[in-house]
Amino acid sequence: MSYYEIQGGRPLSGSLAIHGAKNSVLPILAACLLAPGQSVIHNCPDLSDVSVTLDILRLLGCRADREGDTVLIDASALGRSDIPEHLMREMRSSVIFLGALLARLGTAELSYPGGCELGPRPIDLHLSALRTLGAEIWEEQGALCCCRGQGGLSGREICLSIPSVGATENIMLAACGCPGLTTVVGAAREPEIIDLQNFLRSLGAEVKGAGTPVIAIQGGASLHPAEYRVMGDRIAAATYLCGAAAAGGEVELTGVLPDHLTAVLTCLEEAGCTIHTGPDRIALAGGPSLRSISPVRTAPYPGFPTDAQAVLMAALAGGEGATLFVENIFDSRYRHVDELRRMGADIQVAGRAAMVSGVGRLHGAAVRSPDLRGGAALVVAALGAEGTTQVSGLRHIRRGYQALDKNLRALGADIREVP
Ligand code: EPZ
């Protein structure tokens, strides 16, 4: 099994263009189903989750071709509405296809998206919302079957008890196929939701309110293909910033909006980093050593993003002083803690809380990625650690980071993939 071999202690320096956002491009690719014809998506990152999504589009009857960081999706010949289990298992977020297939074809069938490393991943909010719009949904031999109900689909008001990102996106996509006004109250406010709204508008859809708790979709219009550029990946940016904070040095990231990372930048400044920002760039200079900061409580946007919890923890574990983390979004998002402990980290976990006591500097070890962001956290820890670290389980990392090793090498890190 291949692994990264990392010699820690090399400060990072240089400039890096951040790739397109995984959590934005996945719903945007699903949204291409809504419009017959060829849509062109620029700044599409080369990630395994994106490859799975393109495979699903092809299986459904679309053409999906990649030319560098541009993908061309032609949904004219969309003919199938069933996503087989093996593809659903590869990527839980394939549930996002539900809304788009229902809107375009009036039917959808997919196997229950399995849980994943973050604990159970319920989709009750997705299903109850689609039923409110008029869908009939039932289970048949482990598959989820959906179709337009007797009365057809029509716009409704939907209140979300949790500002679920995926449920908000599924409703936006389904509502495009529902004549009338759909209002989502309690919607997720993440930047990726705004990116999806902007893409839907480019298709000719009437959508407004993304970024606020209330989103309105006037559905039923025929949509046309469009050309669109995906936003930069704020979580990948947070990862590189935490890497520079852990290893020391000065890096500049371009192609990412600082406003998308306010909560993370605030924590890094409190820990002793110097940060300068421009309209679409972030520069960070790491301090000699990171110090403890106020409690980090993950929350829906604009709160501290759960996806950046592991990488910030990894950076602070090698610093000074104690910092409390509270993971409020997922039930099981501390699976990187055991691996960080192998590197000398002092972290005490009790339920949703984790107390990280900086040990001055971690040491190298052989560690295994438990999930996507946990794997990235181990790389962050290794960059600042004394000695050599081997990080295996690269399939997790490849889901969300394009050329992580190559990019870090370009910034001066001593990292190579050992096949
Ligand atoms: C999206 O997942 C992201 N994934 C996640 O990023 C991110 O961590 C998460 O939003 C929160 O920001 C993609 O966009 C592909 P949720 P999603 O629905 O939509 C509960 C990464 O590392 N919930 O906002 O699945 C759920 O269990 C990934 O890039 C229900 O109870 O997250 C969780 O506790 C990991 N019922 C909370 O809501 C539902 O029907 C937030 O989940 C749906 C969700």
Image: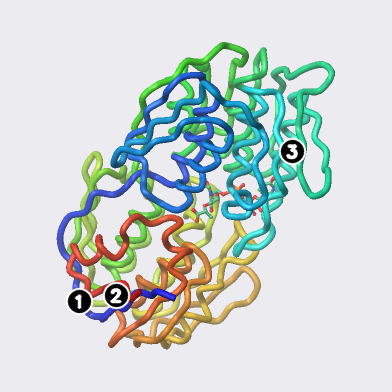
Q: Residues within 10 Å of mark 3 (few under 14, many from 20)?
A: many
Instruction: Name the residue type under label 2.
Output: Leu
Question: As rendered, which of 314 and 43 lies closer to the eye?
Answer: 43
Query: Disc 3 to disc 2, how far (Cα)?
Result: 43 Å
Q: Secondary structure at mark 2?
A: helix
Disc sitting over residue 161 in the figure: none
Point 54% across, 27% down: residue: 33
Query: Disc 1 to disc 2, how far (Cα)?
Result: 7 Å
Report if the beta carbon of the residue with label 2 is closer than 8 angstroms to ligand 1: no
Tell me the residue that label 2 is attached to: 383
At which x and y percent is residue 238?
36, 57
Q: Earlier in the sequence, mark 1 or mark 2?
A: 1
Quick check: 278 above or below 291?
Answer: above
Asked whether the residues under the numbered discs 1 and 2 touch, taking CB atoms below 8 Å apart as contact, a structural biologist would say: yes
The quarter in which the C terminus is drawn is bottom left
Query: Disc 1 to disc 3, how far (Cα)?
Result: 49 Å
Instruction: Name the residue type under label 3.
Output: Leu
Q: Earlier in the sequence, mark 1 or mark 3?
A: 1
Instruction: Name the residue type under label 1.
Output: Arg
Point 68% across, 56% down: residue: 114
Report if the beta carbon of the residue with label 3 is closer than 8 angstroms to ligand 1: yes
Choose top left, top right, bottom left or bottom right for residue 387: bottom left
Quick check: 33 above or below 143?
Answer: above
Tell me the residue that label 3 is attached to: 127
At which x and y percent is residue 144?
76, 42
Point 42% across, 60% down: residue: 398
Tell me the residue that label 1 is attached to: 10
